[in-house]
Amino acid sequence: MASDRERPSRRPSPDPVAVLRGHRAAVSDACFHHALPLLFSGAADGELRVWDTTSHRTVSSIWAHGGAAGVYSIAAGAGLGNTIISQGRDGLCKGWAIEEAGLSRRPIFTIKTSTYHFCKMSLVKVPCSAHGTQTSFSGSNSGTEPQRVPTEDNTGSDGVNLAEGTQEYEQGSSLDGQNILAIAGQESSEVSSKVELWDIENSRKIMCLPQSCSANMTGHLTKKKGLCMAVQAFIPCESGGYVNILSSYEDGSTLWWDVRKPGSPLSSVKYHLESALSIAIDGLCTGGISGGADNKVAMFALDHQQGTFSLRNEIVIERPGIAGIAIRPDNKIAATAGWDHRIRVYNYNKGNALAVLKYHSATCTAVTFSHDCKLLASCSADTTVALWELYPPKAPSKVLIATEEVETREIESDHGVI
């Protein structure tokens, strides 16, 4: 067990390279564009802003969710192209087009989830290469045909027939993760709040985890866990293209789901004594980090062959409360957003603390890394977003680049390309 209090103070904490000011309410979430130098941030008053990360100026601003709902979560990714999704506490998830002049004035789609809670949505994460680029699942995997997901009619029961669990999705779209959104559902009398999968393109609920028809079979694993506080959807290489879900609950437990077995989770662990509030999975989808309302940060590994968790490292922090977690795409460092106004940075592989960033003057709500691994953004209830440059990735040496070019030319020559 490690503690960030035990870390010797070698040098002062760095200052942010820029502080983005403009929001008039607590900033709830932020995310980077996958290709452009843009950062998106959402606030509790419903405002969604676009920032230029080079000039540090506002590009565009819209009121995404009205009233007291606010913007609770935002998500963007390569699979969405030039679209960003905002989630409000009004039970809606809205898609916005990223245009030349900023964001579209009106949403290009609206998903009526009718869920009102404090759990942020999750897009489906796919494994990354060493350079942080997503692995494609569009083709076959070791000769296996692209997999399909069962559908669910929103007007009827939220359970699907287990015998039809591998039937083709109604629209015939492959489960490659690009059009799937995971979100926490409402708590029921039978089980804790469910996890819902939605088809973004058609604004249609696909399935729930667990299924109602299997509630009795798995009641001991899903009952009395309380509300779902965090979800992370991902597609491990070993799953053959099927979506997996990590869901964390009020009682401090985390469940691991596979959509091929919607009746029961693959595994369950309890790393926290209080509510588990945040979870993140690494770029290879082989492990992750969990944070909660207690004073522990848990780093874990996922055994895809056995379907089990294993605790790699448990870090005890000085003050309780982790609202958000992010792991850099290159899997080298991770960051947590604390209730104590601090951003803590860790070596993801070794688990040791690297820095404690002390700029914000109120609760830190979220952290996120840019896809090129050069920037970390932290947002806070103090209405600001801070940008940090920490442990930038090393550029490949000239010798390595030259060697790779020679090897490429030799391969092309052998195949008659040159």
Image (cartoon, rainbow, N blue to C red):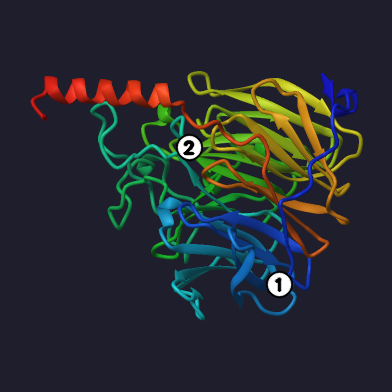
User: Which residue lies under the disc numbered 1?
Assistant: 69
Residue under the point 27% across and 22% down = 406
Of labels 1 and 2, earlier in sequence is 1
In the image, residue 186 above or below residue 101 = above
Q: Quadrant of residue 143?
A: top left
Say which quadrant the C terminus sits in.
top left
Spatial separation of the CA atoms under disc 1 and disc 2:
34 Å
How packed mark 1 is, by other alpha carbons closer than 10 Å (few <14, some 14-19, many 20 or more), is: some
Front-most of 254 and 219?
254
Which amino acid type is marked by label 1?
Ala
Horizontally, residue 227 falls left or right of residue 152, namely right
State the SS at label 1. loop
Q: Position of residue 21 (x, y in %)?
A: 74, 67
Query: Which of labels 1 and 2 is toward the front?
Result: 2
Q: Position of residue 320 (x, y in %)?
A: 88, 40
State the SS at label 2. loop
Horizontally, residue 147 falls left or right of residue 108, namely left
